[in-house]
Image (cartoon, rainbow, N blue to C red):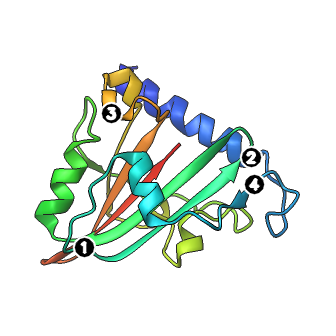
Amino acid sequence: MTGARLGRVLGTVALVGMLGACSSGSGEGRGWEWDKEAGAPEAAAFMKIDVPATATEVKGAVKLVPQDAIHLLSFVTTPKAAEEIGRQFEGQEPLKVRPSQSPPPVDQPDFAHLNLPEPQAVDGLRWAGVCPPCVKDKPRRHIEWIEIYLQKLDPERTRVFLRAW
C-alpha cells in the first residue's frame, strides 16, 4: 500500500471512528455539536484556503466533536480556480473520480448542515485527500487530514467541497 493510500485509509478510519462515537438525536448530548459562531471564514482560515473573490455560494461550518473539530467549506468557482485549489491537496496522486458511496447516517450530517449533498454520495466527483504533516505541508501542519471534492456543475462553474480535521 502506498504512503498516500495508507494516509487516506487512516484518515477515513479516523473520521469514521470520530463519527461512529456519536448517537442519534439533535447533537446535544451525542458528543458533537455545531459551532454557532463559526462559518466559512473560520473554516477557510483553518484550512489555509483563499476562497476566490469571484466565488459564489460560499458556505462553511465547524462541527465540534470530542477532542477535535471537523471544518467544512464549499463554494462555486471557475473550473480553473477549482483545479488550482485541488492541486494543493493531491499529495502523491492526482485528483481522481471516485465512485459514489452511501451517504453518512442522517444523525451525523456534515454538508447536509449546509443544505448541500454529501459529496461522497454524488457520482462523478473528483477527489483528493492528504495528511498535510505526512507530505510536509508546513502551513497546514496542524491539520490531520484534508480532502477536496470537485463537482462540475456546467462548463463555467465547479463546486468545491473541502473537509478537514
Q: Which residue is mark 3?
A: 139
Q: Which residue is mark 4?
A: 32
| C-alpha gap between disc 3 and disc 2 | 29 Å
| C-alpha gap between disc 4 and disc 3 | 27 Å
Amino acid type at image mark 1 = Ala
Say few, some or many: other residues with alpha carbon within 10 Å of mark 3 (under 14 / 14 to 19 / 20 or more).
few
Badge 3 element = helix
Badge 2 element = helix
Say few, some or many: other residues with alpha carbon within 10 Å of mark 1 (under 14 / 14 to 19 / 20 or more).
some
Could you say where residue 71 lies in the image, as x and y percent from the top left?
52, 53
- Mark in front: 3 vs 1: 3
Judging depth in this view, the residue of 16 and 1 nearest the camera is 16
Lower position in the chain sequence, tag 4 or tag 2: 2
| C-alpha gap between disc 1 and disc 4 | 30 Å
Q: Which residue is mark 2?
A: 20
| C-alpha gap between disc 2 and disc 1 | 33 Å
Lower position in the chain sequence, tag 3 or tag 1: 1
- Mark in front: 4 vs 3: 3
- Mark in front: 2 vs 1: 1
Height in image: 78 above or below 29?
A: below
Could you say where residue 157 lies in the image, as x and y percent from the top left?
20, 76
Residue drawn 13% across the image and 77% down it: 155
Residue drawn 49% across the image and 58% down it: 72
Badge 4 element = loop
Judging depth in this view, the residue of 111 and 105 nearest the camera is 111
Question: Residue 55: which numbered mark, if any?
Answer: 1
Residue drawn 38% across the image and 22% down it: 134
